[in-house]
Every structure is written in structure tokens, then in C-alpha cells.
Amino acid sequence: MTVLEAVKKFEQLGRLCLVLIPNEKEKVRRMMKMFRTDIAKQVSARSSPPTLVSDCISRAIRAEYWINQDKEARAQIFKAKKEEKAAERQLQPRQNQDAYTKGQTSNAAQHSKQFGKNKRKGNATGQG
């Protein structure tokens, strides 16, 4: 839930329950509970916690903005790294794949040596 959505919901609930939120300090405390934890931590982390609802809202909006900016920056960095790795994979020779297929053919040859040359009837079906 964004800060603006939380504020709208808080105002709606405040109109319905005037008795439960008697003073400004209690309003601020309850509003802080409606914010996401990362936003609430940043709002209350300053030397003086908010005492007015308007101050709480403005701090929360700023905190949400900077948190979203950080997330976008991290997403762009991750995307750039992912594209860089994909480009490196395309440039690398396929040596590993060739070695893998060579290993498969040698395993198949060993299998035929062990089981293919034995002409007895019982060994072909797995019976002794």
C-alpha cells in the first residue's frame, strides 16, 4: 500500500471512529502503523519523531519516493549485469558443450563393450 492509499484509508477510518483517536499524538502513532515498515522506520528515524499528522505524511511521502528511487536504481544495475552476462555467454566458444558430447560418446562405447559383445541369451534380457 502506498503512502497516499494509507492516508486515504486512515482518513476514512478516522471519520468512522472519532472516539478511538482522541489526540494528534495518537493519530500519528496509528498512522505510522499503517505505513510499510521500511517507510515507518525512515519517518521515525530522525532525531525528532513527527508530532503532527501533516508532518508524518510529508516525511512518509519523501521516504517512499527515495525508497522507490533506490529500488529502480538497483533494478537497472541488475538488468545491466544480466545483459552483460548474456553478451559474454554469446561470445564464449562452446568448448564445454563439445567436451560434454565427447564424454557421452565414450560412455556409449564403454557400454557396448561391456554388454553388446556378450552373445549369451540370458545377458541380453538381464536374466542369469
Image: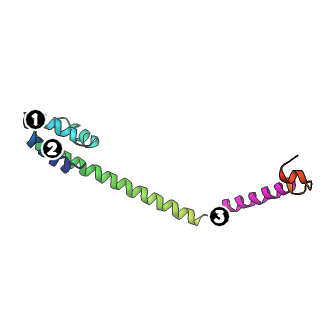
Task: Name the residue located 19 percent from the left edge and 50 percent from the top edge.
Answer: 5
Q: Amino acid at mark 1?
A: Ile
Is tag 1's residue or tag 3's residue first in the polypeptide sequence? Answer: 1
Q: Residues within 10 Å of mark 2 (few under 14, many from 20)?
A: some
Question: Which residue sits at x=52%, y=62%?
Answer: 86
Give the dominant element type of the magenta stretch: helix, strand or loop.
helix
Farthest residue, direction right: 120
The image quadrant that residue 22 belongs to is top left
Q: Nearer the viewer, residue 3 or 66?
A: 3
From the image, tell me which residue sits under label 2. 10
CA–CA distance between discs 1 and 3? 68 Å
- Point out the tag, 2 or 3, that comes first from the N-terminus: 2
Residue under numbered circle 1: 21
Q: Identify the secondary structure beneath mark 1.
A: loop
Mark 1 and mark 3 residues within 8 Å of each other at the beta carbon: no
Q: Please state which amino acid type lies under the numbered disc 2.
A: Phe
Residue 94: mark in rendering: 3
The residue nearer to you, when weighing 11 against 17, is 17
- Is 107 placed above or below 13 here? below
The span picked out in magenta is 96-113
Would residue 77 be seen by someone viewing this image from the given angle? yes
Q: CA distance from mark 2 to mark 1?
A: 11 Å
